[in-house]
Amino acid sequence: MSQPNISQQVAQDAVAVINTGAGNVNVTTGLSEQRFAELFGEFAKQLGIPATQLALDNFFKILQRAPVPLADLDKTLREIAERHRELLIKAEALTSEDPMVQTLLQQATQALKQFDFETADNLLNQAQQQDAAAIAVLEQEAQRIAEVTSQRKVSRATTLFTLAESKDTQLAYRDAARYYQEAAELLPAGHEIKKAACLNNAGLALYNAGEYGKAQSLLKEALRIAEQVLGKQHPHYATYLNNLALLYKSQGKYDKALALYQASLEIVEQVLGKHHPDYANSLNNLAALYYFQGNIAHALPLFQEALKSIKQVWGKQHPDYAKSLNNLAGLYQAQGKYNQALPLHQEALTIREQVLGKQHPDYASSLNNLAALYYSQERYEQALPLFQEALDICINVLGKQHPHTQMVMESYSRCLAAVQGVENQQEARKDSPHRNAPCPCGSGQRYKHCCGQAV
């Protein structure tokens, strides 16, 4: 049996106005108030909604907001009832950890069950206002926590940076790089300059550890941040250019290194002036690159100017002065000017021993360079113990796989072979006849003019 249609029932009777208690509602013509209430009761029973005066009043409040044609009345009332059921299901599912909000939600659900939308709306509004107030307090607290967290991150990053510097000082380069990188990752927005410094130092530490590939990405990122935050005319930017150039030089990428060294020197000269230590260091680095490229004519005056400048700024007992001495000595050595190179190498070695100690890679470098000078002069027995000492330091401090260690190892091996070759020749001479004696081959010539010529 089909359900009775309320629109049809309304049309069968005749009253123009229905008073719902919430105002007069023009529905259609032809129905008494009592009769409509009876019909609504039957309709409510069909749809499973409360057949109360409150429900009736609220149904007609809804109808007041949008005039409903008679033909659509039944459909509209059923749609309202269906939406009410769906709304009630959602309302019953609402929960809150706030006891006050939870109580308000439960009360709102009860009001909705009675079709008391006004009360339900009021209770739901109170619940959302309670949540809004709580959110405001939590957001304020969250902001405070965020600020404190940011401060602690900066504090921890600063401590990590100091720890990294300590590892750097101990020549534990990989540990230093790890702490520098961890510090960089911790720093929040607004600390980009410090972050660039962390990345730059991490890159240098990895460079010193011989991990050039990893170092390159960090040095590039430090340079990018410095350019973005500080601009290209800042000393820090010039420093980061210089450091990346140093890496390129070690990788044999001389053209890339040259462009960066020249740019760095120009910035330092313009911003800091020629009497600043960074200017002397930039001169030194550019001169060293020219030297590696075999451009002695460009390198020599730069090395000499750098040495003079560093001496004025730092004095002689400084690592940079030793570095400059070492560079100039290397150039003289390449020219075959051994007498000019020797005292410079010896002075650099003494300074590095006094300032850096005997377990520093730079001290090992000076040992290696002095040994190389002796080797060039075929003074193999003087060179060999210096190569040996340099190799021991490099292995202990840098490890066997470090490029510098490998280089010293090759030099040591060549020198050892040269010493053994000399010793073999000497043994051969001991076993051979006197050089003025007749040659044992029976030629009748003296030994020195015969078979002894090859010895």
Image (cartoon, grey):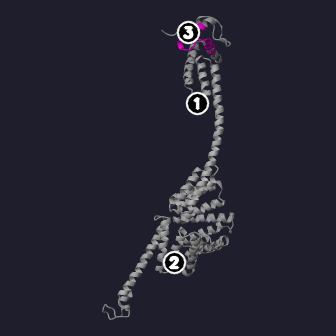
Measure how far apart labels 3 and 1 are at the Cα level: 41 Å
* Nearer to the camera, 375 or 291: 375
Which residue corresponds to the image point at 63% horizontal and 47% vertical from the top-left? Answer: 150
| 52 versus 143 height, above or below | above
Is 451 situated left or right of 167 in this image?
left
Q: Which residue is mark 2?
A: 373
Q: Earlier in the sequence, mark 2 or mark 1?
A: 1
Mark 2 or 1: in front is 1
Q: Which residue is mark 3?
A: 42
- The picture places residue 267, in percent across and down from the top left corner, at 65, 63
Q: Are marks 2 and 1 in contact (CB under 8 Å)?
A: no
Measure how far apart labels 2 and 3 are at the Cα level: 115 Å
Q: Which residue is mark 1?
A: 97
Amino acid under disc 3: Glu
Amino acid under disc 1: Glu
Residue lying furthest left:
442
Q: Secondary structure at mark 2?
A: helix
Which residue corresponds to the image point at 49% horizontal and 75% vertical from the top-left? Answer: 386
Which residue corresponds to the image point at 56% horizontal and 53% vertical from the top-left? Answer: 182
| Whether residue 203 is visible | yes
Q: Quadrant of the C terminus?
A: bottom left
On residue 304, which mark appears?
none
Measure how far apart labels 2 and 1 are at the Cα level: 81 Å
Is 73 situated left or right of 391 in this image?
right
Q: Secondary structure at mark 1?
A: loop
Q: Does the stretch in magenta take in 39?
A: yes
